[in-house]
Image (tube, rainbow, N blue to C red):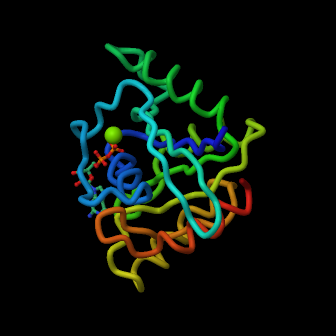
Amino acid sequence: ALPIVAIIGRPNVGKSTLVNRLAGAREAIVYDQPGVTRDRTYQPAFWQDRDFMVVDTGGLVFDDDTEFLPHIREQAMLALAESKAAIFVVDGQEGPNESDREIASWLRQQAVPVVIAVNKCESEDQGLLQAADFWELGLGEPYAVSGIHGNGTGELLDALITHL
Ligand code: GDP
Ligand code: MG
């Protein structure tokens, strides 16, 4: 079976856009509405000589038990449990917030290696600065990327496949 890579992060950081980019979809279609991926969806991806499956998850929020959020949280946890590595997607334009810190603290307790993708960094100079803010999450080097434009994804994937 191919190794699975879980895409984790709070709502609207661009997880689904990044999944489509990494999966090399001909058009980067966000096939679900922003922030409302409820269940895990899988897409095949590859980088260099490695084939893997990317699993998109709903936006993870720990401190909100309204509506379908407990279900989404469970799906993200199930995705991580079956994954060889995870990409933790954060929003470089907004910077780190409390939800990111909660997710990071949970991820640090898991056995699965994590690579941080600081998304929405279309400007490469600014992206480096935006990414540096996420060192505080204690999960290693943050990689500036843009799921929409595609920049930075090579470095992100280089780091990712060292864990596969
Ligand atoms: P998800 O909820 O984490 O799956 O996020 P989506 O992929 O649905 O994207 C949420 C919103 O962020 C949408 O309005 C996207 O157009 C926007 N977005 C996603 N990726 C990027 C990016 O790389 N740059 C910018 N500027 N916006 C993005
Ligand atoms: Mg989504």
Q: Is residue 119 above or below residue 100?
A: below
Q: Give the quadrant of the N terminus.
A: top right
Q: Position of residue 142 (x, y in %)?
A: 58, 65
Q: Is residue 138 above or below residue 33?
A: below
Q: Is residue 108 left or right of residue 15?
A: right
Residue at horizontal 50%, vertical 23%? Answer: 75
Residue at horizontal 57%, vertical 37%? Answer: 102
Q: Is residue 159 above or below residue 56?
A: below
Residue at horizontal 48%, vertical 69%? Answer: 153
Quadrant of the picture in which ligand 2 is shown: top left
Q: Is residue 48 left or right of residue 126?
A: right
Q: Position of residue 145 (x, y in %)?
A: 43, 68
Q: Quadrant of residue 147?
A: bottom left
Q: Quadrant of residue 34?
A: top left
* Front one among 8 and 54: 54
Q: How many marks?
A: 0
Q: Position of residue 91 (x, y in %)?
A: 40, 56
Residue at horizontal 49%, vertical 39%? Answer: 55
